[in-house]
Structure formats: C-alpha cells, structure tokens
C-alpha cells in the first residue's frame, strides 16, 4: 500500500475499535477525506494547493469544542483577540498578520451567511457545533471562486443531514460567570427520498468580571458585559432538492461598557450594546446529467440587521445606529468530473439592498442603496501526471458601482516522493466597500459635520503567495513547512481631520505587506497518545500612503506557538492545549507602549471528555477549563484619539484603553445525550 505523507491538519485522526482502544486510520484513507469549499468541487485534501484544515464531528466531540472560535483559536495561522475595543464587538480574528473579520467568506453547507452588504459581523464566537459534520478551513485568496470578501480564505461549516443525525442530540452546559447554554439537534430519515433535521441553541453569560479580575484599572466599579445569543437551523432533503434556513441572533455589550468616552458621561453600566441578526435561506437542486456531467442550481436570501439602539464608539463619541442589508443570489454551476480532468464553470447573480432602519440614521449623509453584482467563474483541476495536480480558477465580478474585477488563482500539488508532497498557490482577491463604510457616521447623526460620505471608495485588494511541503520522515510522524507573502492595497482607513476642522471620512489609505512561515510536527505515540506543535513567524509593514508613513503591523504577534496533547483511554479523552505568543507591535500613539512591541503570554486550556454508550443511547460528559492558570493578560490596542478619559482608579488615559484585558479562567461542565 502506498503511504500518503500528509496528515490531516497535522493532527492524527483516530477511530475507536470495538474494544474501545484507539487505532490509526490508514494514511490512504485519511487522505481520502473530501472537502468541497477549496474548489467548489469534491477533492481529497492531499491535493489542495493551499493550506487547509478539516475538523470532524468526532474531533469536535472528543475535544469538547462548543463554538466555532474554539476551533479557530487552535488553528496555527490564526490569532484571536477577545473583548475587542471596536464598535463591532465580539472577537477579532487575524490571519497571517491581517485583520480578517470582514475578509473571510463564512459558509453554511456552501452558502454564505455573513452580512451581505458589509455590516459588521460579530457572531463568529456564537456559532454552535452540535449538528456540524465537519468544518473546512482554507487559507489564501479565494475571490477566484467566491468573489468579494474571500480575501484571506473561507470557513465552510458542513452540517449533518437528518439521515446523519438519525435521532436526538442534546448538550447542556453550565459555566462560571453565570454562563448557561443549551444546544439541541434532531434529525430523521423519513423514507428513501426525504430526511429532515432541526437544531437550535441558546447561550447567556455575564462574561468577564473586569472589576474583580483587573482591579488596577477598574477598581470596584461594576462593568456589565452581558451577552446573549441563540440560533436555529432547519434543513430538509427531498431527493436532489435541499431546503435550508439558518438564523443567528447575537446581543453583546460593546467596548462602551468598559472603554467609555464622551458624551455618555463615562458610563460603565453596559447600556451600550451591539445586537445583530443574521439569517440565510437557501434552495439547492443537484442535477446528475450523466455519470460525468453534473449541475447545481441555487437560490438564496441573506440578511443582516443591526437592532435599533445598537451603539458604538469612535473618535471620542458614541451614537445609536441601526442598519438593514439583504441580498438575493442566484447561482448556477456545471461540472465535468472524469478521471484526471475536473472542470467547473458557473454564473452568480446578486441583488443587494442596504439602508438605515430608523429616522435618526436617515440623514442626508446616510442613504439606502441598491446595487447588483454579476459574476462568471471557471475552474480546472487537472492531474497532469499521477503525482502532479494543477489547479487554475478565474472569476469576473461586475459590480454596478465599479468596473469589472478579475481575480485568478493558480496552484499545484506535487507528490514528489511517497513521503513528500509540495504544494503552492498564487492568487488575487478583493473586498468591495460596503454601504455601511461609505455612509458610516463616526460621530453622532445629529451632528453630521464631523463625518462625510465617500462615494469614491474603491475595493480593497490582496495578492497572496504560498509555498509549502508535507513530509512523513518517520513512522507515525508528520512534518509541515510553509511560507506566505501577502500584499494588500487600497486598504480602507478613517481620515481623522478633527484637528484641521474638516469632516472625517473613510478612504483607501493604506498598503499592507505581511510575510512569514509556519513549521509544524505531529506525532502519534502508542497507548492512545498523540501530540502536535506548530510555530508561526509573522512580520509586516503597513504604509498609510496619504500620510506618507510606514509603520509596523499592529496587534499581531511576531512569534506564535500552538500545541496540543491528546490522550485517549477507553471511554475517556483528555485534551491539553497551549498557546504562546510574543512580540506584538503597538501603534506609535499608544500611551503605554508608544510604538514599541509588547510581550505576550502563554495560555493553557484543557478538557476531559467521557462517553458512555447505553443501549441505543450515549451519554457524554465534558469538564473543561479555559485559561487553566488564570493568567491576567492584555492585547495591545490602537490608541490615537485626542480625548482624555478618566478611569475608575482615578487615573486618565488619552483616547481610551491602550491595552485590552483578555478573558481569565472559565470552568464549564457539559452533559450530553444522543439517542
């Protein structure tokens, strides 16, 4: 049997024998894992031209993952920061040195769920995993396949069908900080043609106690960071027709709750909140024309709402704001799949509408807008030889607001030896500026002279390069090495004209360049023990062109190590995870670091999973701890405002908090039942 050297996600996948002991999946089976989001066609992960990760339902369950960010924080190339001091609330995601919240295409079963017209996305950390079959993460330019906002990669959440679930699954969790959550999923195969699934979740938490855990800043002043979210997902299959609906509702207090600014009189009560509702409805029909030709027709509706009263802070002021954006999409693809030639082509028609929801936002500077996007795309996977696979794709997007945009991607996968594979890719991508950015008010709508709309905003652009290898130097050992280089242009930044007396505006100010490498190794030991460690080195510079200045990329660690230890014994699985980062550059106006780099920290998480089969049911128990050693640490924050803000301890900071407190220890206990 020919061994394939690429181990999935640099972590050995394991299966349970009848006796309850763990054994290795043969490498050829492991590398037959199929993904669809990389090329929109089924392909084995060992032929991917880009770095990709697949996390299975078994891995999610045994490691005690509950939400999407539990996965993302353990992906080597991704850095997360919590308690983000931005108007967008939630978690900040950085991929290879670049802020990525608005530069990732997020998919549910291949259908987009992100804000269709660019409103802030604040729900990554709230997406439950109970009904998930696998999570596919691919990095690098993907606009050649998915169009705008696929600048840094894609996340595709593949959910279970009614046939996959075939029963009921329930998980209830209690945790510190008054945290309570319930996740439920049910599915059934009604007959050979019909199967249906329905899932939902509810989560409520008081979140971080800043006055208790960070008394040097907050003293005894109570800070309300309460968060509540819930979701519902329905999916039905009738022969080749799939109908689905996904809705996620997230309500979280924003940075105003712990980083107050005028004119709210330094309110620490948590009254400022950011509430979003994202939903997606889709109908897809798959046509099997003959054994080689296939077609797929898809019609979907996406929408995002910022609830009335949602608030955010910028440049020393705050204001309520609400917004509604929606999109109707039609997608038709045709694929030819035969032997060494796999070709796909298609068209996508999108009709977008965006507008403020209340009269306070409907000033002359904030307007509703309608626009369209027409796209044509094509992609070819060609096995040039038994060991060399070539990939090429090209997409043309014609936005009614801009000139047509062309984005190609070229890649390869070369199995040079039985135990050595090389891969690489080059591509371009873009992000069209949203109406939310074009008409954004950075100060109060009642005083619009401080900000003006910029109808001339251009799309942000990114060019990515990657080259890497996977090897199996020894038995039960996997090694990975890859390098990356990203060049972003026309990056949108705010122009602060307060000191000149002119209005602020958003503009295409910056160029950003990041480069670095990742090296990782996995080892499968005997007796159910496996371990992996990954080191990522990232450097970057960003050029604020109109300010004629070069600065280091901020908020991103130069050095990052992530490691996992997994021990499986009979019905128990023990996970211990470590994350270390260091040398984080700050903005020159940061009043503490003054442009110098800050030291990082080491954080450990752990989980014990126990599964007890009982007749036709299975009970499971998880005892987990995030930040095991209760480390108090900060993330460097941008701080360039002119306002002076008093803090509860009596001190004062210019512009707000120059560093952001991060989450301390959280203990949770989960009980699950599958029947």
Image (cartoon, helix red, strand yellow):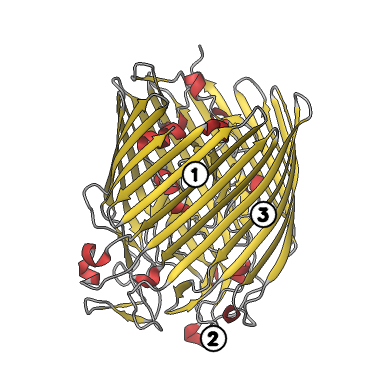
Q: Quickly name the residue at label 2.
A: 446
Could you say where residue 528 lies in the image, as x and y percent from the top left?
31, 23
Task: State which tag comes first along the sequence, 1 or 3.
Answer: 3
**Could one spot residue 97 in this view of the protein?**
no
Instruction: Say what secondary structure mark 2 lies in.
Output: loop
Residue at the disc numbered 3: 301
In this orientation, which residue lies closer to the viewer: 507 or 375? 375
Q: Please tell me how crowded label 2 is: few (under 14), some (14-19), or many (20+) other residues with Cα within 10 Å.
A: few
Q: Quadrant of the image for the C terminus?
A: top left
How far from the left and from the top, in percent, is residue 551? 43, 64
Local crowd at mark 3 within 10 Å, few (<14), some, or many (≥20)? many
Q: CA distance from mark 3 to mark 2?
A: 33 Å
Contact check, label 1 and label 3, Cβ < 8 Å: no
Would you say 47 lies left or right of 384 here?
left
Along the line of sight, the residue nearer the viewer: 167 or 260: 167
The disc, 3 or 2, on the residue closer to the chain's N-terminal end is 3
Residue drawn at x 67%, y 58% is 327
- Mark 1, residue position: 484
Q: Between tags 3 and 2, which lies in front?
A: 3
Q: Quadrant for residue 264, please give it.
A: bottom left
* Vertical comparison of 552 with 537: above or below: below
Under circle 1, the secondary element is strand
């Amino acid at each position: 049997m020919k061994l394939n050297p690429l181990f999935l996600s640099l972590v050995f996948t394991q299966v349970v024998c009848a006796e309850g002991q763990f054994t290795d999946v043969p490498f050829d089976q492991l590398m037959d894992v199929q993904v669809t989001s990389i090329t929109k066609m089924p392909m084995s992960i060992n032929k991917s031209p880009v770095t990709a990760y697949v996390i299975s339902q078994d891995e999610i369950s045994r490691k005690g993952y509950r939400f999407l960010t539990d996965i993302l924080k353990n992906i080597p190339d991704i850095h997360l920061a919590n308690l983000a001091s931005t108007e967008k609330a939630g978690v900040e995601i950085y991929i290879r040195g670049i802020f990525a919240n608005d530069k990732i295409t997020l998919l549910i079963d291949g259908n987009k769920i992100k804000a269709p017209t660019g409103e802030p996305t604040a729900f990554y950390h709230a997406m439950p995993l109970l009904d998930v079959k696998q999570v596919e993460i691919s990095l690098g330019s993907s606009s050649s396949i998915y169009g705008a906002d696929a600048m840094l990669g894609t996340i595709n959440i593949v959910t279970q069908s009614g046939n996959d679930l075939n029963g009921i699954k329930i998980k209830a969790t209690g945790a510190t900080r008054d945290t309570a959550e319930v996740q439920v999923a049910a599915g059934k195969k009604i007959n050979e043609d019909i199967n249906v699934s329905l899932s939902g979740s509810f989560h409520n938490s008081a979140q971080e106690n800043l006055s208790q855990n960070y008394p040097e800043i907050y003293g005894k002043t109570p800070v309300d960071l309460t968060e509540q979210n819930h979701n519902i997902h329905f999916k039905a299959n009738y022969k080749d027709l799939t109908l689905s609906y996904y809705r996620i509702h997230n309500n979280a207090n924003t940075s105003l709750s712990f980083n107050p600014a005028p004119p709210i009189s330094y309110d620490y009560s948590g009254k400022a909140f950011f509430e979003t509702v994202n939903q997606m409805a889709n109908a897809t029909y798959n046509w099997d024309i003959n054994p080689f030709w296939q077609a797929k027709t898809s019609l979907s509706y996406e929408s995002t709402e910022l609830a009335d009263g949602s608030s955010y802070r910028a440049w020393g002021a705050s204001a309520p704001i609400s917004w509604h954006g929606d999109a109707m999409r039609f997608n038709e693809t045709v694929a030819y799949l035969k032997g060494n030639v796999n070709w796909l082509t298609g068209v996508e028609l999108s009709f977008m509408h965006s507008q403020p929801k209340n009269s306070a936002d409907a000033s002359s500077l904030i307007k509703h807008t309608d626009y369209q996007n027409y796209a044509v795309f094509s992609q070819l996977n060609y096995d040039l030889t038994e060991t060399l696979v070539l990939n090429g794709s090209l997409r043309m997007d014609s936005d009614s607001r801009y000139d047509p945009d062309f984005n190609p991607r070229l890649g390869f996968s070369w199995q040079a030896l039985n135990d050595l594979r090389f891969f690489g890719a080059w591509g371009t991508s873009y992000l069209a500026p949203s109406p939310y950015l074009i008409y954004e008010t950075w100060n109060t709508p009642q005083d619009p002279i401080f900000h003006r709309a910029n109808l001339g905003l251009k799309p942000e652009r990114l060019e990515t390069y990657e080259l890497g290898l996977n090897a199996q130097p020894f038995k039960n050992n996997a090694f990975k090495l890859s390098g990356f280089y990203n060049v972003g242009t026309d990056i949108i930044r705010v122009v602060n004209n307060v000191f000149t007396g002119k209005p602020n505006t958003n503009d295409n100010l910056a160029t950003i360049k990041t480069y670095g490498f990742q090296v990782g190794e996995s080892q499968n030991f005997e007796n159910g023990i496996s371990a992996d460690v990954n080191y990522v080195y990232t450097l970057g510079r960003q050029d604020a062109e109109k300010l004629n200045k070069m600065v280091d990329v901020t908020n991103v660690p130069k050095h990052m190590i992530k490691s996992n230890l997994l021990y499986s014994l009979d019905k128990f699985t023990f996970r211990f995870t470590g994350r270390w980062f260091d040398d984080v550059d700050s903005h020159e106006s940061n009043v503490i670091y003054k442009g110098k780099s800050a030291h990082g920290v080491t954080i450990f998480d752990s989980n014990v999973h126990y599964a007890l089969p009982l007749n036709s049911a299975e009970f499971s128990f998880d005892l987990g701890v995030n930040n095991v050693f209760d480390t108090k640490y900060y993330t460097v924050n941008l701080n360039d405002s002119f306002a002076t803000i008093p803090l509860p301890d009596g001190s004062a900071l210019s512009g707000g908090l120059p560093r952001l407190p991060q989450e301390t220890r959280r203990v949770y206990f989960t009980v699950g039942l599958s029947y």
